[in-house]
Structures are given as C-alpha cells and as structure tokens.
Image (spheres, helix red, strand yellow):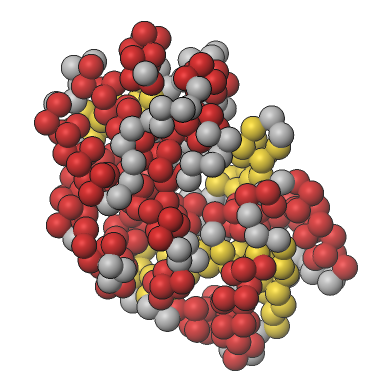
C-alpha cells in the first residue's frame, strides 16, 4: 500500500494506492468517521462495473450507503445533472452529516465534487477514481465543476476531497484509449517537475503499456506526489499550479477545433510537442531535449502532430478565449529542460502561427 498526504492544513487528506483497495474503502471510511451515510455517485457504466463491489465494502464495514447513477459521458457534465442529483439527495433525506463518494472518471469526480461543494452549502466527499487520468490528475487537488455552452469547466469551485482511494486493479477494465488519455498526463509530470521520472517512464514503457499493476502503482504514486506538492504550494492556481497546464493551452484549442472528437490525451500530447517547439524557437529548450520528449510521446502511441484537417483560425480563436488567457493573451508553459518549465505569455503571434501550421 502506498500513501501520499496532500498537506493543506485543516483541508489535508490522504491518497491511498493499492491493488484491490475498492474492497477496503468501507473499513478505511469507518476508521475516518467521516459521515453517518454515504451516497456513491457513479455513471451507469461504472456503476455496473464497480458499484456493487464498493457498496459491499461499505455495507460490510457496517456503513449506510446507497448508489446514485447518472448517464455516462461528457454530455452529463452540466448544471442540469448537478441539479437532478441534488434533488435526489434531498428526496433521500441526505443532510450535512452525510457524505458523497465519487466513483468513476474525471466527469464523475468533477460533478460529484461540485455537488458536494454546494449541496447544503457543502458536505464532505471522497474520490474513488477509476480511470488512469482521474487517478493521476483530476481526483487530486480539488478542482470541481461543470461545462456550460459557453465553455468547458466555466462553472465550478475549489473543493478538496477528504480522501482519495486508488485501486490499481480497476485499470484492467480500462479501454486502451482511456489508458492513453491518462498517460499523456503522466508524461506531463515528468516534463514539468521530475526528470528522473521522465527517464523511468522511458525505461518502463513496455510494462506500463502491458498494464503491469506494480509499475502502474509506482507511476500513480509519483504523479500524485508531484501534484500534491504543486497543489500544496498553490491551491487556487494563482501561480505554480499553472504548470499543470503544460500542453493544455494548445491542447484545449486542438480538442475544441476537433469538436471534441480528438481525445483529451491525444490533444495534450500534441500540445506538449507544440509548446516544446515554441520553447526551442525561443532559445529556451534544446532541440535534442525536444526530440526526446517527442520520441517518448510517440513511443507510448500518442500523436505528435496537429491533424491537417483542423481549422487553424478556429484554433487561434480558442487560444484567445481560453479561460486562462488574460486580456486575450494566452499563457504558455514552456519547458526549459526535461523536469523544468517556465510560465509566460510572451510568445509572438507569428511564432504561434508557425507552430500551428
Ligand atoms: N488538472 C490541472 C489541475 O488540477 O490544476
């Protein structure tokens, strides 16, 4: 069993990583004495896969628990779903002594965390992520929220979970494309923070793609530890936390210009290569290092070039309106070495054009 603490004073919480941990969530929560009743929120697919196992664990520990199911997919990540779930909580008599458990991927974690933040002005919640992306990124750090027609994640709050339970064996059920989504974020951590971890990923590529759970647990632990350190230093993303957006500024524009047909991980992978090209052009990053990054991304089976059919002017429009751009100027996280990045909005428009082309 691996343990990482997210040290946020009175909002501190543990992340536990272990094979078969789903069966141990009940006992751990019983010890934590978080609530008198637990409402497990899951989409229909995840509820079918893991809902019974989690409920059995909770009931087996003598805890009261029920399952709330909503339809799977990004399309559920909107205010109407949160409103519907809130009504169902109210009808079930859920009060401030109760807690939510997000069982699922990023959509479920984001919706459930936001629901927990606003239901009765805030009730505790716990994350049980079931995708690699959620395990290494979205379940940790307290970003919650939903999309509105005007943009993704435009409504939400920072609201930390009380615990994160990561069972590596759930990854056996994960489709390959979902594994790749998570791996793009995994590579990101090596580039922004941890050169030895980047080398570890290169050395363990076959084991990772072969879903060696021991190696994946080490990957998850190291990613969560990096994310914990970054979030501890800058919980509300006023400064350092922005490094977690490495590859995401151009990545989001690529995703949006593809009308979200391109997977998030693929878009972030291409975005990481694009910004490393910008960094090389600005003389910040050695071409040889950029090649190492591109080679590692490609070796994991992720794309490295922007699909020719994507409309470049649409992408430029998205860069300007990205919620993290200020005054229409997008910011970029640029690598200066593998393991170190800088944040800047000082990238000339013609350089952006060249890289997008
Ligand atoms: N996924 C980026 C962050 O949590 O800040």
- Quadrant in the rendering for residue 348: top left
Q: In the rendering, at what x and y percent does residue 268 appear?
A: 40, 39
Q: Is residue 224 left or right of residue 309?
A: left
Q: Residue at x 39, y 14 (%)?
A: 353
In terms of depth relative to the viewer, which is nearer, 266 or 241?
Answer: 266
Q: Residue at x 45, y 66 (%)?
A: 174
In terms of depth relative to the viewer, which is nearer, 123 or 156?
Answer: 156
Q: Is residue 244 left or right of residue 336?
A: right
Q: In the rendering, at what x and y percent does residue 63 appear?
A: 65, 84
Q: Is residue 242 left or right of residue 109?
A: left
- Quadrant in the rendering for residue 345: top left
Against 232, is 129 above or below?
below
Q: In the rendering, at what x and y percent does residue 222 appear?
A: 29, 58
Q: Residue at x 61, y 37 (%)?
A: 152
Give the quadrant of the N terminus.
bottom left
Q: Residue furthest front?
A: 309
Against 319, is 261 above or below?
below
Q: In the rendering, at what x and y percent does residue 254 appear?
A: 47, 31
- Viewer can see residue 193: no
Against 21, is 9 above or below?
above
Q: Is residue 87 left or right of residue 310?
A: right
Give the quadrant of the C terminus.
top left
- Viewer can see residue 313: yes
- Quadrant in the rendering for residue 205: bottom left
In terms of depth relative to the viewer, which is nearer, 329 or 120?
Answer: 329
Q: Residue at x 75, y 53 (%)?
A: 82
In terms of depth relative to the viewer, which is nearer, 283 or 179?
Answer: 179
């Amino acid at each position: 069993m691996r343990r990482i603490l997210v040290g946020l004073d009175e909002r501190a919480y543990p992340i536990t990583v272990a094979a078969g941990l789903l069966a141990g969530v009940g006992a751990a929560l019983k010890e934590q004495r978080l609530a008198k009743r637990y409402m497990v929120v899951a989409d229909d697919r995840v509820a079918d896969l893991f809902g019974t196992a989690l409920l059995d664990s909770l009931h087996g520990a003598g805890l009261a628990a029920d399952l709330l199911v909503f339809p799977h997919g990004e399309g559920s990540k909107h205010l109407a779903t949160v409103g519907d779930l809130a009504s169902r909580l109210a009808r079930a008599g859920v009060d401030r002594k109760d807690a939510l458990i997000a069982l699922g991927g990023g959509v479920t974690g984001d919706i459930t965390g936001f629901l927990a933040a606003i239901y009765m002005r805030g009730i505790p919640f716990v994350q049980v992520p079931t995708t690699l992306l959620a395990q290494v990124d979205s379940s940790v750090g307290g970003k919650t929220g939903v999309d509105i027609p005007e943009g993704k994640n435009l409504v939400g709050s920072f609201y930390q979970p009380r615990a994160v339970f990561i069972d590596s064996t759930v990854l056996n059920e994960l489709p390959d494309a979902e594994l790749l989504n998570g791996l793009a974020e995994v590579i990101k951590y090596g580039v922004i923070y941890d050169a030895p971890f980047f080398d570890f990923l290169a050395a363990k590529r076959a084991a990772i793609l072969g879903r060696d759970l021991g190696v994946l647990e080490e990957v998850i632990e190291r990613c969560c530890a990096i994310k914990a350190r970054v979030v501890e230093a800058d919980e509300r993303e006023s400064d350092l936390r922005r490094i977690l957006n490495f590859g995401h500024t151009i990545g989001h524009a690529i995703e949006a210009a593809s009308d979200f047909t391109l997977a998030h991980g693929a878009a972030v992978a291409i975005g990481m290569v694009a910004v490393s090209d910008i960094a090389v052009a600005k003389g910040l990053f050695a071409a040889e290092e950029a090649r190492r990054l591109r080679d590692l991304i490609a070796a994991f089976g992720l794309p490295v070039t922007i699909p020719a059919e994507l409309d470049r002017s649409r992408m430029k429009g998205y860069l300007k309106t990205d919620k993290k751009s200020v005054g229409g100027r997008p910011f970029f996280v640029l690598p200066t070495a593998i393991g170190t990045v800088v944040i800047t909005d000082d990238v000339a428009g013609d350089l952006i054009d060249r890289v997008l082309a």
